[in-house]
Image: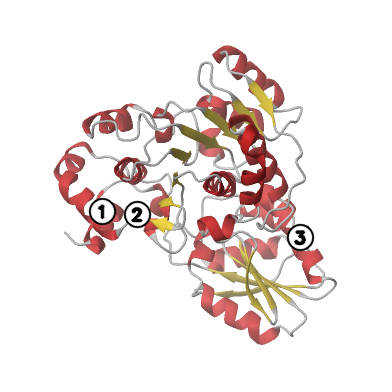
Amino acid sequence: MTYNEAVQWLYSAVPNFQRDGGSKNYKIGLEGPQALWEHLGFPGRDIPTIHVAGTNGKGSTVHMLASGMKEMGLKVGVFSSPHLFNFRERAKIGTTMVPEMFVAEFVSAHKTHFEQHGYSFFELTLMLSLQWFASQKVDWIILETGMGGRLDATNICAPELCIITNIGLDHVQWLGNTRALIAKEKSGIIKPGVPVVVVQNDNETRPVFKDSANEAGAPLIWAKDFNLPTDLKGIHQNANRNGAATALELLFPEYQELWKLGLNRVVKNTALAGRWMEIDTSPLTICDTGHNADAFQYLVPQAKAAANGAHIHWVLGSAGDKDFGSILQLLPTDNSTFYWTGASSPRCASSAVLAESAANHGRYGNHFTNVQQALSAAKTNANEKDLIFIGGSTFVVADLEL
């Protein structure tokens, strides 16, 4: 089996939330991944682990942690999702992605067993990552949850530390329709006696985290404000930086100067992409994977500040199961032009549907079949001082030809 055949099999042969959303046999629960982990010999079980959950900021936080630890000389395996441009981004050590040959050999060796038990895409990519990390004898593993926490496949781990980034109204059909209910699901990663760093401290979710930590006998640490520089741009990164720095100070107090340096070398040390990422300068063109209202409450003022009074061209798409209306309400109606786009993922809403929804919210614009068409139209209309912003969905950013 070749690498391309292995990846195609993973995409097509098993339930895949990234591709299908929750409509096609979406699986949650720990029995499946626990059994699969046991079948594979528990790869990575003896390697110290950090477990990260939250609505937004998980990907940035795990890569900040990894960058800080790399500056300390540690070899760190990072499991994160979804990927942007390459399936192999899901398992990385520094900037090195899991090799194509390893993916092909892993699937080939276990394909029959996988088929017999119907494991999900997420479960299999998690195990692929753990197997590779174990083979590479990493010093630490950092696991990013998928959608939830309590029933997320990554929750089979026994971490040294847990981190919960923030809580927003996303995936409400599975996690609950209030921030308190979602916080309860995310706090399911809290383990008996294991410290947990919580980034967001507010009246609605604070009691949930306190109760969950008390029930588990887990030390609860609220993230501090470190006010440290980071190369990940955007005001929304401040909270992620504080969570990562609080965790690193807790684990490695004697190496502060090194991990602080790492927070400002995240892109260099981990090749993280898609976070307020500048892809052109004339006009200034930014893409960001933020895909819900919690993200856009930061992205909109950030875009306005970057535009500095100039016109903003918004190239936006959305997954069909997202509350796009809550994003639309945050978008400015003045000094803005909208380009509604579809994307290659079958989970994305059609641009025509988005355009109709946007018009109902007073945001009018043309719609395009794909991201490159929408971006081309924006470039044609924009002058050198304008700002082009591309986002609304990870799938939109993933379709950029960079």
Tag on residue 28? none
Q: Amino acid at mark 3?
A: Gln
- Three-letter code for the amino acid on which mark 1 is drawn: Phe
As measured in the structure, the alpha-carbon distance from the residue carrying label 2 to the one carrying label 1 is 7 Å
Dot 1 falls on a residue whose secondary structure is helix
For the residue labelled by badge 3, is the local secondary structure a helix, a strand or a loop?
A: helix
Name the residue at 70% across, 43% down: 239
Neighbours of disc 2 within 10 Å: few (<14), some (14-19), many (20+): many
Q: Which residue is the site of mark 2? A: 98
Q: Position of residue 130 (x, y in %)?
A: 34, 40
Closer to the observer: label 1 or label 3?
Answer: 1
Picture disc at residue 102: 1
Residue at image position (26%, 33%) is 36
* Camera-nearest residue between 184 and 144: 144
The answer to whether 214 appears left or right of 142 in the picture is: right
Does dot 2 land on a helix, a strand or a loop? loop
Q: Which residue is mark 3?
A: 302
CB atoms of marks 2 and 1 within 8 Å: yes
- Which is closer to the viewer, label 2 or label 3? 2
Residue 308 image point, x, y percent: 84, 71
Q: Earlier in the sequence, mark 1 or mark 3?
A: 1
Residue at image x 21%, y 36%?
A: 117
Q: Which is nearer the eye, 112 or 103?
A: 103
Left/right placement of residue 111 relative to residue 311 reads: left
Q: Is residue 393 visible?
A: no
Q: Is there any visible trace of residue 26 in the rendered image?
A: yes
